[in-house]
Structure formats: C-alpha cells, structure tokens
Image: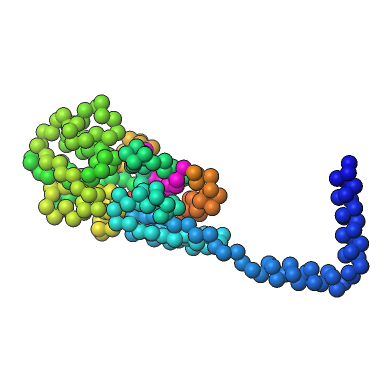
Amino acid sequence: MKKSKLFGGLVLTASLFLAACGNGGTTADSSAAESSSTVAAEPTTVKIGLVSESAVEIWEAVAERLADENIDLEIVKFTDYNQPNIALDNGELDLNAFQHVAFLENYNANNDADLTPIGFTFVSPLGIYSNNYTEYSEIQDGDTIAIPNDVTNGGRALLLLQAIDLITLDNATGTTPTVNDIIENPKNLNIEELDAAQLPRSLEDAGAAVINTNFAVDAGLVPTEDALYLDTDNIQEVLDIYKNVVAARAEDVDNEVYKKVVAAYQTEETKALIAETTANTDIPAWD
C-alpha cells in the first residue's frame, strides 16, 4: 500500500513539473530524443568459416541481407576441412558452414568438443569422376580410385563405390566403413586415400576419384554433367547425417543474432544461388 501511494505521488509530481515547464520544457525533451535516435548502434560482428568459393558467393549475398539488420557477417575462408572446426572450437570463429552432420559428430567425438548444428543448409552429393572413362562400368581391373581420407567422407565414398557394384562392404560397419571393411573387390581396385582438396588434381593419374561437390565445382567440374555417378541420384538412400549445417559452440545455440544469420540464409534467394553456383547440384535441406 505504501508503495502504491509513493508511486502515485511521483506521477503527480512529475505531471505538475511538466505542466510548469510549459512548451519550453517539451521542446527540450523532444530535441534530446531526436538527437538520441540519430546515434546508430554499432553493428554486431559475426565471423563465419567457409571452405569453397561457391559457399563464399552464397554467404556474401547473405551478408548483404544481414547488413540491413545491423549484423556484420565476416567471412573467413579456409582451404581444407580440418581448420574450420578447430577455429570455431577455440573461439576464432562464431559459426562455420562447411560440413555435414556426420563430419561434425566425428570431430566432436575425436576432440572432446561440443560443436552443435543450429540450422540446415544443403545436401551436397558425392560424385565419382574420371578423365579416362565416360561410364563407371568402364573402370578397369587394377585401377586406382582416389577417395577422401577423412573418416566420414571416406566412408561415404566407399558406400558410393558399393552402390555402383565396384566393391562390397561388411554390413556391420554402418555409415563409416573404412578400406579395411572391403570384403569383395572383384576388379582389384587400389583405393587411395587423399586430402579431399587434392582429389580433383588426382584425376591426372587415377582411374577415377570420388570428389566432394564443393571441390569439384571449384576445379571447374559440373557435377550433373561430368560425374559418372552422384550418390544423390538415389536421394532416398542419402542419410540425414549427410545434410550440411551451420554450426556453433553449444553455449551459443540460442544466440538470437546467430538465429538471424541462419534465417537470412534459409531463403528463396539462397535456393536460387545454390542452384546457380553448383549447377543445380546441391539440394537445399531446410524445407
């Protein structure tokens, strides 16, 4: 009750004071408000790590949209798959967007990390390419087939080779088979594991190579035209763990600014750019 009377007294006193000030007081208050409103807040900077040129082009357009929301999206480009998670984990980045769920989970498990998806981006097919053959059935006995040397993309590459009947894998290995899980290799293929970024260059010597779309596109290949086979040709067999994501540290999953970054990406404009920059190869994954 005492608080109510005190509040009422303060309101009454303030009212009388404003009335005594007249128009002069009102003008001063109004001018101060106008002056305050002209001072723009500093933009919030968000650093995001990317790997491919096509991704940079897409996220530059996202950055333009975010500028209207007073968010400065700073793009940091890496040349391989190893560094963006390390940089996010140690705080050099706020977000990254280059990997699928399986790759992220493998990093967390091996590094005692807690990086977490906060939004889907796209599904990027894995394809097998060759400078020597126009059909995968032409691959010869004893040929070298180059695949990514990381656990998740290497496993996915082996599943691709199994899908086109070049090898048979032990079913017990699940989604991350290794070359040691090959139980049948009728063409005696030599499976060579290389850094994913080096795979397009390996086409000069290998019979064929299984290449991630971003590196294929950066090397001038058109996946829908140049690949002998894309694993998304049977999209129903591509697991959800191969959906690419925007990742953050676990403590930032509810960060409102980062949610705006994801929302600015997941738009019709981005869908169009994905189609344009990847020659209609990558498939938006957030719908």
Q: Is residue 203 above or below residue 241?
A: below
Any part of residue 234 in sight: yes
What residue range appears in magenta? Answer: 241-250
Q: Main secondary structure of the magenta part?
A: strand
At x 57%, y 64%, the residue is 42
Q: x, y (%) of residue 248?
A: 45, 47
Magenta-span inclusion, residue 248: yes
Q: Which quarter of the picture shows residue 52?
A: bottom left
Look at the image and tell me in which quarter the N terminus lies.
top right
Q: Which quarter of the picture shows residue 3?
A: top right
Q: Is residue 106 above or below residue 98?
A: above
Q: Is residue 112 above or below residue 205?
A: above
Q: x, y (%) of residue 24?
A: 85, 73
Magenta-span inclusion, residue 167: no
**Looking at the image, which is closer to me, 159 or 136?**
159
Q: x, y (%) of residue 232?
A: 32, 42
Q: x, y (%) of residue 135?
A: 17, 45
- Left or right for 132, reference 70: left
Give the farthest residue toward the top: 172
At x 90%, y 58%, the residue is 13
- Left or right for 72, reference 177: right
**Looking at the image, which is closer to me, 219 or 152?**
152
At x 25%, y 26%, the residue is 172
- Left or right for 182, reference 261: left
